[in-house]
């Protein structure tokens, strides 16, 4: 289905340098179109997408066309037909049309083609198989526009076949359902996801982790994750959760207070783990060292909302653990109790505007006062620091020195 002048191309890009690629390819006898997220998100009113393009030229032909036009190219994925084209300091990823020859659930053997519908057929969901040229003409081979308008998220063709081509599509289905669905979950798609969940064992944990983190950041994460956990979609990595309602509360709190979603914060609220479980989750999902440290720090510290709402106590938390920790802990505890702290945005501003004091006494000062043994220096410093903290950081250097 072709819709003439259906899309306002300026919503994808207004950069004439980028649009130059259409002329470069056309002059070489080919066609290039925007595809996937760029088209889908503009049609649905979303922003912040990546620019992905497809062409009926082979990678070699595209490279030759760019060379003739004096445009640099970068071989970033030639095995899968993707060439990087550098235009005006922007790297465009342009993939040649493909059709699958053989798949194993993780990777596919592909063959280049000049048939746009064959290329669309190998994509996962109808809403991800919409193309557009630089004039705003839209090419929709599987009624993706209709599905976007109605909020229907479904696979192209037979769900089981699409999933067996790449088992990660199970998680992608849930992610896009959370992002775009206005209707109940497609029954055929859900059944195929459940029936083929064991296929996820063949997918690298890094790909699973990255896709799951994307799901955590979606607006309706709690709903789709509950379905996933109830049906053991991620049973090899995550157990059931009693806190999906808390995750839903957190998502709505973030939206209402204009708080940037944080995947680790949402993951923590999904389980409210103790230290052992936090470490176990980090190990199972191959989280980074920094991500693991965040989960463990939140689990180790029993700091309640009252410790952050009250100014003097809040300053102690910030001094001990930092501003980010203080704010994250406030939001986590709010989600745990499912209450919105009064004046939350004001407290947020106070946290991040707080000037963190610097302890004004050093070990050298203690030595000058006659404490020369290392054990004495450490003990005296710790006692002085505690006095300073207990005074709400008000004791001056001179007052502290007198206490030595």
Image: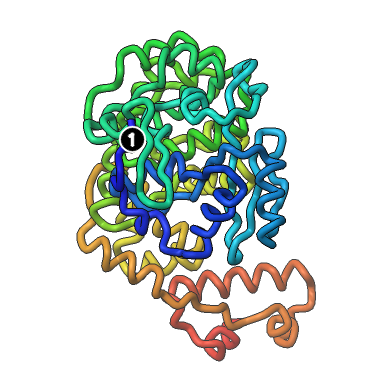
In the displayed structure, does residue 143 sit left or right of residue 396? left
Residue at screen point 40% across, 43% down: 132
Give the residue furthest to the right: 373
Q: Is residue 310 visible?
A: yes
Residue 295 location in percent, x, y?
52, 43
Residue 217 location in percent, x, y?
40, 43
Q: Residues within 10 Å of mark 1 (few under 14, many from 20)?
A: few
Give the residue furthest to the top: 195
Relative vertical location of residue 94 with respect to residue 24 in this rendering, above or below: above
Residue 317 location in percent, x, y?
44, 62
Q: Is residue 276 visible?
A: no
Please give the count of numbered marks on the rendered protein: 1
Residue closer to the observer: 335 or 174 = 174
In the displayed structure, does residue 375 sit left or right of residue 106? right
Residue closer to the observer: 282 or 329 = 282
Residue at screen point 26% across, 41% down: 249
Disc 1 designates what residue? 2
Residue closer to the observer: 389 or 375 = 389
Residue closer to the observer: 199 or 273 = 199
Residue at screen point 71% across, 49% down: 64
Residue 360 location in percent, x, y?
58, 83
Determine which quarter of the picture holds residue 185. top left
Determine which quarter of the picture holds residue 338. top left
Residue at screen point 78% across, 70% down: 374
Determine which quarter of the picture holds residue 76. top right
**In the picture, which quadrant includes the C terminus?**
bottom right
Secondary structure at badge 1 equals strand
Relative vertical location of residue 13 with respect to residue 301 in this rendering, above or below: below
């Amino acid at each position: 289905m072709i819709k003439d002048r259906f899309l306002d191309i300026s919503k994808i890009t207004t950069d004439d340098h980028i649009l130059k690629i259409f002329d470069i390819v056309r002059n070489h006898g080919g066609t290039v179109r925007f595809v996937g997220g760029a088209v889908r998100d503009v049609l649905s009113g979303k922003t912040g997408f990546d620019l992905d393009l497809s062409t009926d030229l082979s990678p070699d032909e595209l490279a030759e066309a760019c060379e003739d036009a004096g445009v640099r190219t970068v071989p970033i994925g030639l095995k899968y037909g993707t060439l990087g084209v550098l235009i005006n300091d922007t790297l465009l990823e342009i993939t040649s049309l493909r059709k699958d020859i053989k798949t194993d659930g993780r990777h596919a053997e592909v063959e280049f083609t000049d048939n746009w519908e064959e290329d669309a057929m190998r994509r996962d969901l109808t809403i991800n198989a919409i193309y557009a040229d630089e004039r705003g003409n839209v090419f929709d081979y599987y009624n993706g526009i209709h599905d976007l308008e109605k909020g229907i998220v479904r696979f192209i063709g037979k769900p089981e076949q699409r999933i067996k081509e790449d088992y990660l599509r199970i998680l992608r289905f849930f992610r896009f359902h959370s992002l775009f669905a206005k209707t109940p979950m497609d029954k055929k798609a859900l059944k195929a996801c459940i029936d083929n969940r064991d296929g996820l064992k063949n997918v690298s944990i890094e790909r699973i982790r990255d896709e799951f983190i994307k799901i955590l950041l979606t607006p309706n994460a709690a709903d789709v994750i509950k379905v996933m956990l109830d049906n053991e979609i991620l049973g090899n990595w995550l157990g059931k959760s009693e806190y999906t309602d808390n995750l839903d509360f957190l998502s709505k709190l973030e939206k209402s207070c204009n708080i940037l979603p944080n995947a680790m914060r949402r993951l923590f609220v999904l389980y409210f783990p103790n230290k052992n479980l936090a470490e176990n989750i980090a190990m199972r999902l191959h989280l980074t060292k920094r991500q693991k440290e965040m989960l463990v720090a939140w689990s180790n510290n029993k700091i309640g909302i009252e410790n952050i709402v009250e100014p003097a106590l809040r300053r102690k938390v910030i001094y001990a653990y930092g501003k980010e920790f203080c704010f994250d802990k406030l939001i986590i505890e709010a989600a745990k109790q499912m209450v919105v702290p009064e004046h939350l945005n004001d407290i947020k501003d106070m946290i991040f505007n707080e000037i963190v004091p610097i302890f004004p006494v050093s070990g050298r000062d203690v030595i000058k006062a006659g404490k020369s043994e290392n054990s004495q220096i450490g003990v005296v410093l710790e006692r002085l620091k505690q006095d300073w903290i207990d005074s709400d950081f008000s004791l001056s250097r001179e007052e502290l020195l007198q206490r030595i």
